[in-house]
Amino acid sequence: MNAPISLAITGQVAVVTGAARGIGFAIAQALGQCGARVAIADLDGMAASIAAGQLRELGIEAIGVAVDVADESQVLAMVDTVEEALGGVDILVNNAGIVSTGPLLDVSAAEWNRVMAIDLTSVFFCAKAVLPGMMARRAGRIINIASVAGKRGGGLLGNSCYAAAKGGVIALTKGLAREAGPFNITANAITPALTDTEMTRALAPEARARVLADIPLGRAGSPRDIAAAVCFLASGAASFITGEIMDVDGGYMRD
């Protein structure tokens, strides 16, 4: 008989970027509860250390690492630190990102470049840093957090600049799936809609109500909803899934 399907990833090493709070922290905690050793990588090194301490209190092996994911040299140094402390990276979750709002005509070149660097180029840097080790071991999971804005072109969940970056993440994910597949490495993306975080709680009530009215399940997502999808994609249960763009959106992208 076949072994039961399991989401356990016991002993694997996971790096989650932008994980000191919000969705990233929920992902890191969930991966740890599934058995992973977790590196919380965040621009705010102190917050990353505190978050890692919170995971350790739950019995999860975790470290915090300060990194600017838009700086390739810092990304390479972060991966070195993780490998020395925990071992080779088995799971990479590219979660770090910022939201840009407002009309395209109001977006400066500096703002455009900043959004692209943090939301898109960082995914390239982080994937490039962990791929050699994954290829050598012939195993790995890369999971990118994109957005429904990357499919719909923005709207209340981000402007055209943000949508372009997240659309780039979607395309990069599909390309990575093709390139890394022969090495038994999967690459998938998750596209959340409105999710309850500090950032989205700042939405004006009328704007939030308009988004919720277009979600068949009638509520915003929670960070745990996104984390559950990540754990599935990181596990052996998803070993034959790659290049997938998974909407975790309460039905928002039903059309």
Image: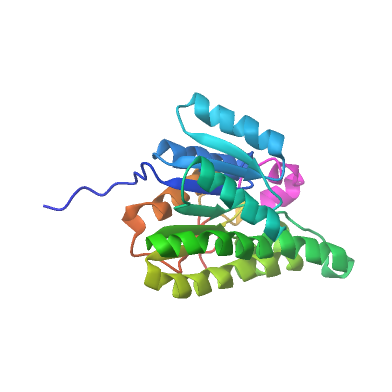
All told, the count of numbered labels is: 0
Q: Nearer the viewer, residue 40 or 107?
A: 40
The residue range painted magenta reads: 195-210
The answer to whether residue 189 is left or right of residue 48 is: left
Residue for point 18% across, 49% down: 3
Give above or below for 152 relative to 208. below
Give above or below for 233 relative to 84. below
Q: Position of residue 39 (x, y in %)?
A: 55, 42
Residue for point 34% across, 60% down: 239
Q: Nearer the viewer, residue 25 or 154?
A: 25
Q: Nearer the viewer, residue 13 or 239?
A: 13
**Residue 120 visible somewhere in the drawing:** yes
Q: Reply yes or no: does residue 204 show up in magenta.
A: yes
Among all residues in the image, which is located at the extreme top?
57
Residue for point 21% across, 47% down: 4
Give above or below for 96 relative to 65. below
Residue for point 57% across, 71% down: 172
Among all residues in the image, which is located at the extreme front?
84
Name the colouring of the figure: rainbow
Q: Position of residue 116 (x, y in %)?
A: 73, 65
Q: Position of residue 21 (x, y in %)?
A: 64, 39
Q: Nearer the viewer, residue 185 or 8?
A: 185
**Residue 69 visible somewhere in the drawing:** no
Q: Position of residue 102 (x, y in %)?
A: 82, 61
Q: Reply yes or no: does residue 75 show up in magenta.
A: no
Question: In terms of image quadrants, where is residue 165?
Answer: bottom right
